[in-house]
Structure formats: C-alpha cells, structure tokens
Image (tube, helix red, strand yellow):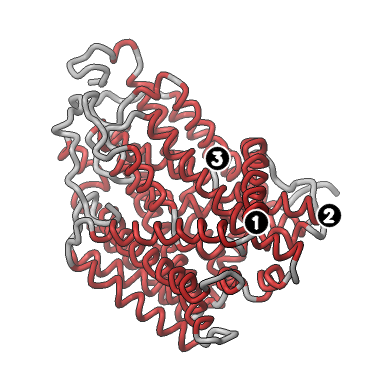
Amino acid sequence: MLTGDVIDTVMNLVTFAFLGAMGWLLARKLPARDDRPADSDTAKQPPSSGKT
Amino acid sequence: MQREASAQNSGGATGGTALLVISIAVIAAIGIWGVADPEGLVALATRVVDTYFYSRGWFIMLAVSAMLIFCIVLAVSRFGEIRLGADDDRPEFSTPSWIAMLFAAGMGVGLLFWAVAEPLTHFNFGRDYADEGVAAHQALLATNFHWGIHAWAIYGVTALAIAYFAFRRGTPMLVSAPVEYLFPGERWARIVGWLSDFMAIVAIAIGVGGSIAMGVFQVADGIDVVMGGTSTPAWLVAVVFVLIVAAYVPPLLVDLGTGMARLSNIAVSIAIALVVFTIIFGPTEYLLNAVLVGFGDYVTSAIPRGFQTPVFFDDAVSRWFSDWTLTYMVWWIAWGPFVGVFVARISKGRTIREFVLGVLIGPTLFSVIWFGAFGGIGLYETLHGAGDLAAMAVSNVERVTFDLLDRLPLTLITTAATIVAAFLFIVTSVVSAAFVLGTFSTGGDPDPSPRIRLIWGILLGILGAAMILSGSIDAVKKLIALGALPFVFITVLLMVCLVRALGEETRPAARGTEEGSMPC
C-alpha cells in the first residue's frame, strides 16, 4: 500500500490552511486606520537597557 | 498614536497583565517539570519534535528560504530606499560600529562550542557515504549553511518587522505590533497578537535556557581541562552554574547603561583574537585554503541548499537532517525575537537596503572565516594527524574546542580566554534576554522594572538548570526546538505584515502626503 500516515497528512493540511490564511491576509483590504504619519518625534522609543 | 498603538497591543492593561502572569506560570511549570523529571520532558520534546519535523521539514525550509529571498528582493527593489524611521532620520551609530554590534548580537557561546565540533561531527557522518575529501567539503558546507545567510535572514525579517513598525509607524517593540497595527480592533488580530507575544516569550526563554546549559558545559569543561581532568564532575558543573547565576542577577537589578555592551564587546574581541591566533599558529596555508574552499562551496550552494531535504535518502540521513539543519533553522527562529529587538534598536535611521545588506553579509562572512579556520584545523588533525579530535566529537563533544587549544601554543592563556568569553557571552545574553522578556510580557514597556527583570532572570536560571539536568546537548537541542516550533508560523506572519505595510507605503495614493511618502 502506498498510503501515508494519517497524523502526518493532517498536520500538513493544517500547514496548508495556515498558508491559505497568509494568502488571505495578503489579498484582503486593510481596514481604515485613524492614524497620523509617524515623524521622528512620535516614533522615538525610549532607550532600553540590555545589549545596547 | 503611540499610546493608541500601545493600548491596542496585548488587549490593553488587562491583556498585558494576563500575558505576564500566564507566561511566567507556563515557563515556571516547564522549568520545574524539567528539573523534577528531565527524562520525561526530553522524551516528550523528542516525540513532538520528531513528528513535527518529519511531517513538515519542507515547510520550515520553504519558510526560511522565502525569508532569504524576501530580504534580497527588498534590498534590490525600490523598497530598499524606505528608511526605518522618519524620512529625515539618520543612523545613530556609524556603519563600522553598527556592523560590530551585529557581530555581537549574532555571536554567542554556540560559536565557541561548535567551532571545531560541528564540522568534525558532519565529517564523521559524511565519510560513511563518500570519500574523505568530499566528506570534508560537505562538512564545511553544512556548517556554513547552518550558521550563514539563512540564519541572518531569519533574524533580519524579525528585526525588520519590529523596527519598521516601531520606528515608522510608532508601535511598541512587540511581536504582536504588526498584526494589531494593520488590523486594529479585529478580534482575531488581538488573539493572534497575544499568542504571538506569548510564543515569542516561550521561544526566547527556552532558547536562552539552552544557551545557559551549553555555556555551563563549556565553562565547566574548560576549568576541568585547566585542572588536568579528563571528565568533568557534576559538582563542577553545579558550581559553574551557581557562579553564572550569581554573575547575571546583580545587573538585572540596576540600570547599567552601556556596561553590558562593553562586556559583550570584550567577549567578541576575545573570539576574534582566538580565530586570528588559530590561523597564525596553526597550519596557516591549510587554514586559509579551508576558508577559501568553505567560502566558494557556500556561495555557489547556499540558496539551492535552502530548497533541499533528504526525501530520497535513507533514514540515517533524514535523522541527521532533522537533528541538525531543521533544528538549527528552528533554533534561529527561536532566537529571532530576541536578536530581532536588539538589531532593530541599533538600526533606526538606516534604509532597508543598508539594513538587509549589513545584516545578511557581514556576520555571514565572519562565520565562514570562523568555521573555515576552526573546522579547517579540526579536519587537518583528522586527515593528517591521529584523528583524535574527530573521535572526541563523538564521545565528548563538549571538550573538542579545548582539546584543540591544547594542541596549539599558549594553551593556558587561550583556554582561560575561551572560558572568559563563554562566561561573558552567557551573562550578557541572559541579562539582555531578561530585559526583552520583561518588555514583551508587560505589553511593550521599554524599561521593565527590576522586579520583573529579576523574575525572568530566575526563570531563565531554572530553565537552564532543567536543560543541564537533561544531561546532553542533543536533549537541549530537542527542548529548544520544542519551544520554538509554534514561532515558525509567527515569523511567516511577520513577513506577511511587512509586505502589506510596505505595499501600502509605495501606493501612488500614499505618496505626497504631509510627511513625504508616509501613508496617512
């Protein structure tokens, strides 16, 4: 028999569903946003400690 | 807009508190489970990871290759002119400093640990299938592939998404920010956003826990070698672990400014000195040839290799592929949000083109030189010497780097330097990770409180202990892969969000608005 593993197939189908969802996100219209263009003042993030 | 964007992320104050509590609880539970029953946790990780990898190795490789091609397309297209920030922002750091910081971001204890061990491990495997010359070529190629441009494409995509949305759209530096910004008020976006931050936290925590374990093994082995031992005792591993925790806890409680950056630069300087030392005092011509061959094989094979899986090969090759190539790709994805936030922070004001070229090329070139030198000297000893290093890569992989240094001059100095570098890499990584975890778990607070940082530092220590108790590097790799698996999907989602946002910028209707090419 050449049939494969059921769990394997199901998990791959889930992956394809995810890829389909990504395709939908790429194609759908973006909702209107009530925002302003960022300029250098409002886009500033306070510096954080850590590696830098 | 920044406050609005912050409130949208993680569902506002309530969502942020829930994320903090739940993520701390889950990470604590995993850590305690790992300490109480390390074999059980490793067994579960092995089952899940093997099933996932065997089922979807194609998806992981396709996703990673897509990220690389996406980066290249951005660099060569008109999108490359878009600046990470306002159109009149300029970079905060000079280009040489920026490249050096990218090296520091990408270098860690893993490069020290695997410098010789990985090429020799692949060589040992490959010579069952081909003659030794071919096996040596393939060993260096595989190593360069694992640490090269694909890894940096993963970091690059994550960092670019975070940087673009933070600096150009004013969102917090969160993994959830892109999807919640593009689809404001949509319930599915809030849920996916919350889960994105949660999965990023899990991936970072387990990834850093694994690095703590690897670093502890390396430092303990180094000390044991200096003391003349042949097998590192458990008490020494425990002492080193306690010392590392004692070293990273105090910095979590204070604001160190550039202190951590300086320690990181010391570690990178030691690593650079080690590779130069090895090339000069080792068989120099052989090593330079190895670097050239490694570079040539890699440049001609890197992109096609991203589309290869061992589908037509035997089970042993499939096992090798999932234990190494897939594990590495998922490992880089696990580190993506952590390295991504750091790279994003230092890249404000750069164009996308500068960003992509710098992130992809500089660190990759260094890795090729690194593994050409260290892998080359390991292969030299194997092909022209007694072959002890290759045997040690099988029996005692943690000691290979130190055994190599023992065969070069100034052993005590180079061994001590390696131990110091490994120690500094772990400490600076843990401190940085605790900050990033604090930021992610508090809805984007760029300066989380010392209490939050300390909690994450303690949890990272518990996870590190669990990984150490798992007993082997293979077990550590499986646990890291388990933590990172869900994040593969999130990284793809970030890429999609970036595509949508960049497409919005360059629509004709979006040009010529108040602030240049910014959409409104």
The amino acid type of the residue labelled 3 equals: Ala
Snapshot quadrant of residue B373: bottom right
Assess whether mark 3 and mark 2 are in contact (beta carbons under 8 angstroms).
no
| Residue at x 53% of width, y 59% of height | B481
**Are there few (<14), some (14-19), or many (20+) residues within 10 Å of tag 2?**
few
Residue B118: assigned label:
none
Earlier residue among tags 1 and 3: 3
Name the foreground residue: B23 vs B346. B346
Q: Disc 3 marks which residue?
A: B63
Q: Position of residue B276 (x, y in %)?
A: 51, 56
Q: Distance between the residues labelled 1 and 3?
A: 31 Å
Q: Which chain carries label 3?
A: B
Earlier residue among tags 2 and 3: 3
| Residue at x 24% of width, y 51% of height | B443
The amino acid type of the residue labelled 1 equals: Gly
Q: What secondary structure is found at the residue carrying circle 3?
A: helix
Q: Position of residue B114 (x, y in %)?
A: 56, 62
Seen in the image, is A40 located left or right of residue B53? Answer: left
Name the foreground residue: B100 vs B79. B100
Q: Disc 2 marks which residue?
A: B131
Q: Disc 1 marks which residue?
A: B376
Mark 1 or mark 3, whichever is nearer to me: 1
Mark 1 or mark 2, whichever is nearer to me: 1
Marks counted in the figure total 3
Q: Distance between the residues labelled 1 and 2?
A: 17 Å
Name the foreground residue: B490 vs B467. B467
**Whether marks 1 and 2 lie on the same chain:** yes
Query: Is any atom of residue B490 visible in this view?
Result: no
